[in-house]
Amino acid sequence: MIEQMTDLPAGALGFTARGKVTAADYENVFVPDVEAAFALNRKLRLLYHVGHEFTGFEPGAMWDDTKLGFRHWSGWERIALVTDVNWLRLVARTMGFTVPGEFRLYRNEQLAEAKAWISESFREHHA
């Protein structure tokens, strides 16, 4: 399941993955929220938290995530991935240089720090 975080400023989206993330989760929560935000903002910031309750991705979910990222390739200003899942951290460290905009990787205990980074200087840049 994917849940949207509600404590980030406009133009910054945050999502938490719990349990098994399915393609339906992306189609019903993630994609519509991101598309709606891009309709209002030229640039977005994204925080994606994969916490302790995460059990895996359905293959279709990862494909939906990749398609969405490419569709808005130049629109990502900052992306933060918060996770202790080893394989996700390895992929992020290996592929992080290919992510558009600024990218940072955080551990679960650094979630507050990641939220602060996604939100910092936001009002000055988007006023």
Image (cartoon, rainbow, N blue to C red):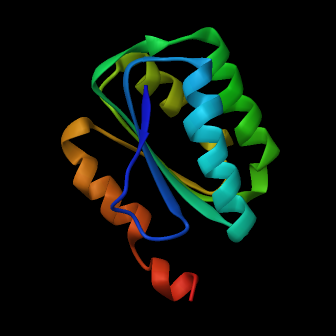
Q: Which residue is found at the position 42% from the left and 62% from the top? A: 118
Q: Depth check: give the residue in front, 117 or 2.
A: 2
Q: Is residue 95 visible?
A: no
Quadrant of residue 95 in the image? top right
Q: Residue furthest left?
A: 109
Place of residue 88 in the rendered image (x, y in percent of width and height, measured from the top left): 45, 23
Q: Depth check: give the residue in front, 80 or 5.
A: 5
Q: Is residue 6 visible?
A: yes
For residue 31, side relative to residue 70 (left or right): left
Q: Depth check: give the residue in front, 24 or 83.
A: 24
Place of residue 45 in the rendered image (x, y in percent of width and height, measured from the top left): 54, 59
Place of residue 72 in the rendered image (x, y in percent of width and height, measured from the top left): 76, 50
Quadrant of residue 97 in the image? top right
Q: Depth check: give the residue in front, 72 or 35.
A: 35
Image quarter hosting the N terminus: top left
For residue 63, side relative to residue 22 (left or right): right
Q: Which residue is found at the position 43% from the left and 12% from the top? A: 56
100 is higher (above) or lower (below) than 39: above
Q: Number of numbered discs present?
A: 0
Image quarter hosting the C terminus: bottom right
Q: Which residue is found at the position 38% from the left and 50% from the top? A: 5
Q: Residue furthest front?
A: 28
Place of residue 60 in the rendered image (x, y in percent of width and height, measured from the top left): 66, 14
120 is higher (above) or lower (below) than 79: below
